[in-house]
Image: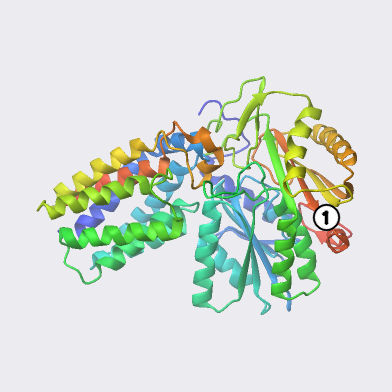
Amino acid sequence: MGTMKKLINDPADVVSEALQGMAAAHPDRLRVDLENRIVYRKDAPRPGKVGLISGGGSGHEPMHGGFVGLGMLDAACAGEVFTSPVPDQMMAATKAVDAGAGVLHIVKNYTGDVMNFEMAAELAAADAGTEVLSVVTNDDVAVQDSLYTAGRRGVGVTVLLEKIVGAAAEEGRPLQEVADLAKKVNDNGRSMGMALTSCTVPAAGKPTFELAENEMEVGIGIHGEPGRQRLPLAPARDIAAMLVDPVVSDLPYQQGDSVIAFVNGMGGTPLLELYLMYNEVAQLLDRAGITVARSLVGNYITSLEMAGCSVTLLKADDELVRLWDAPVNTPGLRWNA
Amino acid sequence: MGVDSFVSWLRDVAGSLHDNSAYLTELDSAIGDADHGANMDRGFQAVVGMLDETSFDGTDELLKKAGMTLVSKVGGASGPLYGTFFLRFGTALAGADLTPEAIGKGLHAGVEGVLARGKAELGDKTMYDAWAPALEAYDAAVAGGSDLGTALTAAAEAAAKGRDATIPLVARKGRASYLGERSAGHQDPGATSTTLILESAARTLS
């Protein structure tokens, strides 16, 4: 345990103390149920509005608790670090944000998250009669979507989806329409990530994997799990191509397409480097004839202190861009509000 | 043989998972996300807390409550999977005499629950690779006239072999499947915790 350097008191208390901190920092926008580990929008439930809930393991901040507020989520359930929350939390959140218009669960495609949200939806149906629909995000092109894997991971597109679908719910659209839009966003988004370092889960006390000084891991997820390929460290422009090419060729994104381009930091990479990466990504897209309608650069879906980045593209029509521009006021994203 | 034996089993499992927490997490670091030991330990400590506060007349109620506790406390994939195992095991024991045959039916019901929730197949490098040979060995022992302790010992030994056989496999389910070929050469953490649970059963239920 001697090598772990973190701003913590006790590894067992990391999640609950961080939630107490969120409650103390944002009393104007958030209400935090510390017992159930749920972050609520302060004024939830909003009459007539579809409730949006997400959740997942902790360690990806600001996702999801930092995306609760006007124009995004109504509630976020926090699990232990990198561990899905439990059905009890999702049940409690579902009941609390349902104002009669139903609730959408936004679930990232990980075995545990999907199972726990499924159990919660079964229990909610049997219990209170709350109408619940789910969308599962699975945008990571590093994973082959086949019978031989658990399917593609939900990564960067989750952030864009929560913003865009949040804006649609804020407009008062009905549940089915909100769910259809969520599926549309997921279907049009693709991502790929890489790591320069591993990360240390507080309860484990040591890095999840070891990378030599001259190595990087390409095709990583957001849980410190090793990627698909370990390669010698390369210049940023080569790394940008390693991430952009498989993303572009997967959907595929074509000449004349308009996208929201998202360069995300994994938690331990400074903005200086993320903007440098964005420059490389923008040039690659320009050369491919793909127009960037909107961009987002920063640490939004992280993997503790991992250094590295991911690139997400979302093919965006005028409707998606308009919803992207709509007001949002959360601890993690804020504009026009 | 009654509810007290099953209480002893659950307490013994909690002790075993606590002692092996760092080992399970180390296995999970190689091909997963480094939380299996901590999660199982937290879940079974909650089961022990529940046992300290509650007394049970029936084994079915005991196991169902243990299952609900795991679902509520563990999270990840292990919470729903082990939670479902104990829920279905308990449900199958309702009104039954605790014969080796009845317990075998309960174990089968539990593992069917795991399959329904996790959709794994043999050879996917999951806990099912320990459960499947364990059930087979248990059934064969009971059919041959063995008592419960002997049958559970055979099950635990078969589980351990199944666990070891996960090492060369390429994972097709769960987070390890993201690694593709790189998941080969590592022992599956879920098959390891399943083996610990069965080894504990062989020690305490007879």
In the displayed structure, A323 sits above or below A306; it is below
Q: Chain of mark 1?
A: A
User: Which residue extends farthest left?
Assistant: B145
Taking the image as drawn, is residue B172 in sight?
yes
How many residues crowd mark 1 within 10 Å: few (<14), some (14–19), many (20+)?
A: some
Location of residue A329 (image quadrant): bottom right
List x then y, in percent, for residue A88: 51, 64
Asked which secondary structure carries label 1, the reply is strand
In the displayed structure, A309 sits above or below A130; it is above
List x then y, in percent, for residue A314: 79, 52
| Foreground pick, B75 / A31 | B75
The amino acid type found where label 1 is placed reads Arg
Left/right of residue A25 with respect to residue A130 in the rendered view = right
Taking the image as drawn, is residue A204 in sight?
no
| Residue at 67%, 19% in the rendered image | A214
List x then y, in percent, for residue A52: 68, 66
| Foreground pick, B104 / A70 | B104
In the displayed structure, A308 sits above or below A259; it is above
| Residue at 56%, 42% in the rendered image | B178
List x then y, in percent, for residue A125: 53, 75
Q: How many marks?
A: 1
Left/right of residue B154 with respect to residue A56 in the rendered view = left
Q: Which residue is mark 1?
A: A334
In the displayed structure, A23 sits above or below A43; it is above
Color encoding of the figure: rainbow
| Residue at 53%, 72% in the rendered image | A124
| Foreground pick, A34 / B201 | B201
Left/right of residue A8 with respect to residue A28 in the rendered view = left
For the N terminus of chain B, give its image quadrant. Answer: bottom left
Location of residue A191 (image quadrant): top right
